[in-house]
Image: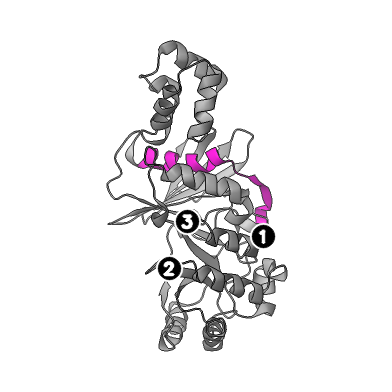
């Protein structure tokens, strides 16, 4: 619930309005996990809330840790659907990758999550609770987060197909009396839901945007990302140009390009990408090159490090900013494109709840 909904709820219980703020701060700022822990509420009210409301709707079934420190959380909703989140530590910042849907409907050919299909959209609370769950596991309930927290909406699902719940969740997470993770520390990735890119551009306080591209040719992108058959490259790049016009001073946005060995990683492919950006006069962009994270169910190989470096060099020689995303958590199926509620005996299981 947001603040207004909480106020209405407590008024319906015959309680004063200020109780709603006590509970809001307890859940979102202090990250408490049961009503009984909110000791600034009367005992009788805590008992009533335990009977009539839920403070938590996700259960962590398994947690895995990678040799690089990445943590992957496999959770379940109260109705049994899988939800995954990933914690990516680094020296100067922490990043949490969260999911917007259980499964995904888009059928990207190189993505393991696509094999699940769409199970259902996640609620506002289920999106926010992923962040609270991870922070509590890493730093303890009500623990300080020393580096601050960056968020990336790049877990399971297509965020722009759960747009209303996504935006409501981001509003909750940015509240200064809650998690206080401001939009400038959040990036949302879309496979190219064109109408929502226009809508996203019009938001007053919006996060950063990343668009998954992976090919500058319609024919290949039709195969790799079938959403291209609904909104082709012309429609997508036109929307991207409109979005570029909404950027704040000094801001850029990202095109993500999954590097697939022998499929989309040649010098010619890099030049096609440069030409595509030039055609639509896109200048305030950067290209995130993502070496493919394989799995036995997928028919693609990752590009060699040498080929990735060469592709990057071709882009940069023509004035396009590019960087390579270093794989994290591959050994626990936590890397980009690997989230599929997978639980394998060779994974290092840290905790079962």
Classify mark 3: residues with Cα within 10 Å, few (<14), some (14-19) or many (20+). Answer: some
Tag 2 residue: 325
Residue 233's disc is none
Q: Is residue 1 in the magenta section?
A: no
Label 1, label 3: how many angstroms apart (C-alpha)?
24 Å
Query: 287 above or below 87?
Result: below
SS type, badge 1: loop
Q: Which of marks 1 and 3 is nearer the N terminus?
A: 1
- x, y (%) of residue 291? 49, 71
Q: Which of marks 2 and 1 is nearer the N terminus?
A: 1
- x, y (%) of residue 173? 44, 44
Tag 1 residue: 106
SS type, badge 2: loop
**Residue at point 50%, 65% (across, down):** 210
Label 3, label 2: how many angstroms apart (C-alpha)?
23 Å
Left or right: where does residue 93 sit relative to residue 82?
left
Query: 68 above or below 173?
Result: below
Left or right: where does residue 103 sit relative to residue 273?
right
Left or right: where does residue 346 sit relative to residue 144?
right
Residue 206's disc is 3
The magenta region covers 115-138
Query: 126 above or below 270?
Result: above
> Along the line of sight, which residue is nearer the eye, 327 or 253?
253
Q: Is residue 136 in the magenta section?
A: yes
Q: Is residue 349 visible?
A: no
Query: 310 above or below 66?
Result: below
**Residue at point 46%, 68% (across, down):** 253
- x, y (%) of residue 289? 47, 73
> Along the line of sight, which residue is nearer the eye, 98 or 182?
182
Label 2, label 1: how many angstroms apart (C-alpha)?
23 Å
């Amino acid at each position: 619930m947001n603040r207004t909904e909480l106020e209405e709820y407590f008024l319906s219980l015959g309680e004063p309005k200020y109780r709603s703020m006590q509970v809001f701060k307890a859940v979102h700022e202090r990250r408490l996990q049961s009503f009984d822990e909110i000791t600034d509420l009367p005992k009788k009210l805590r008992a009533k809330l335990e009977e009539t409301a839920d403070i938590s709707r996700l259960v962590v079934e398994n947690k895995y840790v990678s040799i690089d420190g990445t943590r992957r959380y496999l959770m379940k909703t109260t109705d049994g659907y899988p939800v995954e989140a990933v914690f990516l530590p680094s020296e100067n910042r922490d990043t949490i990758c969260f999911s917007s849907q259980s499964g995904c409907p888009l059928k990207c050919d190189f993505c393991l999550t696509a094999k699940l299909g769409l199970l259902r959209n996640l609620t506002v609370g289920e999106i926010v609770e992923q962040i609270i769950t991870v922070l509590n596991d890493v730093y303890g309930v009500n623990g300080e987060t020393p580096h601050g927290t960056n968020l990336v909406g790049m877990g399971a699902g297509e965020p722009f197909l759960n747009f209303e719940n996504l935006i409501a969740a981001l509003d909750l997470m940015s509240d200064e009396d809650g998690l206080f993770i401001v939009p400038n520390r959040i990036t949302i990735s879309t496979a190219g839901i064109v109408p929502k890119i226009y809508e996203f551009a019009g938001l007053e306080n919006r996060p950063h945007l990343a668009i998954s591209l992976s090919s500058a040719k319609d024919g290949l992108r039709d195969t790799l990302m079938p959403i291209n058959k609904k909104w082709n490259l012309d429609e997508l790049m036109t929307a991207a140009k409109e979005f570029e016009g909404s950027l704040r001073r000094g801001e850029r946005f990202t095109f993500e390009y999954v590097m697939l060995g022998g499929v989309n990683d040649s010098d010619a492919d890099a030049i096609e990408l440069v030409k595509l950006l030039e055609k639509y006069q896109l200048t305030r962009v950067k290209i995130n090159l993502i070496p493919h994270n394989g799995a036995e169910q997928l028919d693609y190989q990752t590009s060699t490090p040498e080929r990735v470096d060469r592709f990057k060099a071709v882009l940069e020689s023509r004035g396009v900013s590019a960087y390579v995303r270093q794989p994290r958590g591959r050994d626990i199926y936590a890397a980009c494109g690997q989230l599929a509620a997978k639980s394998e005996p060779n994974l290092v299981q840290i905790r079962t709840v």
